[in-house]
């Protein structure tokens, strides 16, 4: 423990962003106190305890001597980290519509202190209070930096014309990295955490908008998994756990066993009794989802690769060719 227990949770996507950022620097979540437990929790649920998230950030920042870790996490965010929710936001026609949808699903991302909107003249102010506790600088800075980066990704540009960014926490020794990240004056020690931007930004169109895409994706995943042949209960449970871990290239048997509350040996034995191997089941689940996504012409091959957890389109193409003997683009055209 590095502080008081807090109410609420944050989205497990944050954990994946941190994991990816650490991996790019030769580290893993398990290298830090609480990292393994939080990784397991993130794999089993869409949300994790904000207290555990704060404590992990604190441990990583201390070990790496990086007080601006929150900015680093925000800068590493991609739409793919949010999975279907990310594509749901990106599919909206305008930024205003995306933010309205985000408000609807806010508890999937942050259930600590609720977001409040206010339009004052030509400025939109998004505010977060402290009614349910103060998670601290790293959590707050990571959340606001992630929100800013998400907006940049959806609009396809870095300059958002932010008017001001306020944090409730005391000022750090050096504010220059914050001014540079947000592109505006960043103030600390304020009454609330606040982000202000021009109201005209709400009408800005998003680069890839399709109002029904998110619903189609969610329906496709549910229908795909439900359409699989009847199997032993353990096989269905493993398939569901694997579907939740699509952001990982090859989830381990140990990780999925922890998600299901089993020992690795017990999971291996039960899968073997059902006539399945773990790696083959992972590949088969991925192939089924790949075919489903390829059936939707709205999705590019790059987007499908990200949805399936591949680092780039070429990695997905190689895997699909290994599974089916043909490239995904060829398979898609033939099916059409």
Image: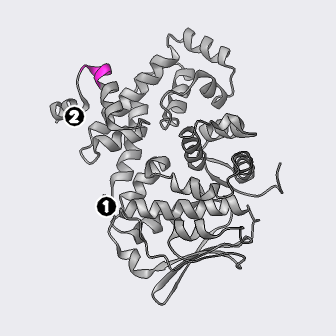
Which label number is shown at residue 207? Answer: 1
Quadrant location of the C terminus?
Answer: top left
- Residue 71 lies in quadrant: bottom right
Q: Which residue is mark 2?
A: 329
Q: Is residue 190 above or below residue 275?
A: below
> What's the residue at 64%, 28% (across, down)?
260
Picture coordinates of residue 287, whole percent (x, y): 36, 27
Q: Is residue 15 above or below residue 262?
A: below
- Residue 29 lies in quadrant: top right
Which label number is shown at residue 306? Answer: none
Real-space CA distance between mark 1 and mark 2, rounded to the nearest whole angstrom: 23 Å
Q: Secondary structure at mark 2?
A: helix
Picture coordinates of residue 256, whole percent (x, y): 60, 27
- Decide if residue 85 is on the left or right side of residue 316: right
- Please tell me which of labels 1 and 2 falls first in the chain: 1
Dot 2: within a 10 Å radius of its alpha carbon, few (fewer than 14), some, or many (20 or more) residues?
some
Dot 1: within a 10 Å radius of its alpha carbon, few (fewer than 14), some, or many (20 or more) residues?
some
Magenta region, mostly helix, strand or loop?
Answer: helix
- Decide if residue 277 is on the left or right side of residue 110: left
Q: Is residue 17 above or below residue 282?
A: below
Q: Secondary structure at mark 1?
A: loop
> What's the residue at 59%, 21% (across, down)?
253
Residue 115 drawn in magenta: no
- The span shown in magenta is 321-325
In front of the other: 106 or 74: 74
> What's the residue at 62%, 28% (across, down)?
255
Picture coordinates of residue 108, whole percent (x, y): 57, 54
> What's the residue at 56%, 43% (across, down)?
16
- Decide if residue 60 is on the left or right side of residue 184: right
Picture coordinates of residue 125, whole percent (x, y): 54, 79
Please say if the residues under marks 1 and 2 sit with CB atoms less than 8 Å apart: no
């Amino acid at each position: 423990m590095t502080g008081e227990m807090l109410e609420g949770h944050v989205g497990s996507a944050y954990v994946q962003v941190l994991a990816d950022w650490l991996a790019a620097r030769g580290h893993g979540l398990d290298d830090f106190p609480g990292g393994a437990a939080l990784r397991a929790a993130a794999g089993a649920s869409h949300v994790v305890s904000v207290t555990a998230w704060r404590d992990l950030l604190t441990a990583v920042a201390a070990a790496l001597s990086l007080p601006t870790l929150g900015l680093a996490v925000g800068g590493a965010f991609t739409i793919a980290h949010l999975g279907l929710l990310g594509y749901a936001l990106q599919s909206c026609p305008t930024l205003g519509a995306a933010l309205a949808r985000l408000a609807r699903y806010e508890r999937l991302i942050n259930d600590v202190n609720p977001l409040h909107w206010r339009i004052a003249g030509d400025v939109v102010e998004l505010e977060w209070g402290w009614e349910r506790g103060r998670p601290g600088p790293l959590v707050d800075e990571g959340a606001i930096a992630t929100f800013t980066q998400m907006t940049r990704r959806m609009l396809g540009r870095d300059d958002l014309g932010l008017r001001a960014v306020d944090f409730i926490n005391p000022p750090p020794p050096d504010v220059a990295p914050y001014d540079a990240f947000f592109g505006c004056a960043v103030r600390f020690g304020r009454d609330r955490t606040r982000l202000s931007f021009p109201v005209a930004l709400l009408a800005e169109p998003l680069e890839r908008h399709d109002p029904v895409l998110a619903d189609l994706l969610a329906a496709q995943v549910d229908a795909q998994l439900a359409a699989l042949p009847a199997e032993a209960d353990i096989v269905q449970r493993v398939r569901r756990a694997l579907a939740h871990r699509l952001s990982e290239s090859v989830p381990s048997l140990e990780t999925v066993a922890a998600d299901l509350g089993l020992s690795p040996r017990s999971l291996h034995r039960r899968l073997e009794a059902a006539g399945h191997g773990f790696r083959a089941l992972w590949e088969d689940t991925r192939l089924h989802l790949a075919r489903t996504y390829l059936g939707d012409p709205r999705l590019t091959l790059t987007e499908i690769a990200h949805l399936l957890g591949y680092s780039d389109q070429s990695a997905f193409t190689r895997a699909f060719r290994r599974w089916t003997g043909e490239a995904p683009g060829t398979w898609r055209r033939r099916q059409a």
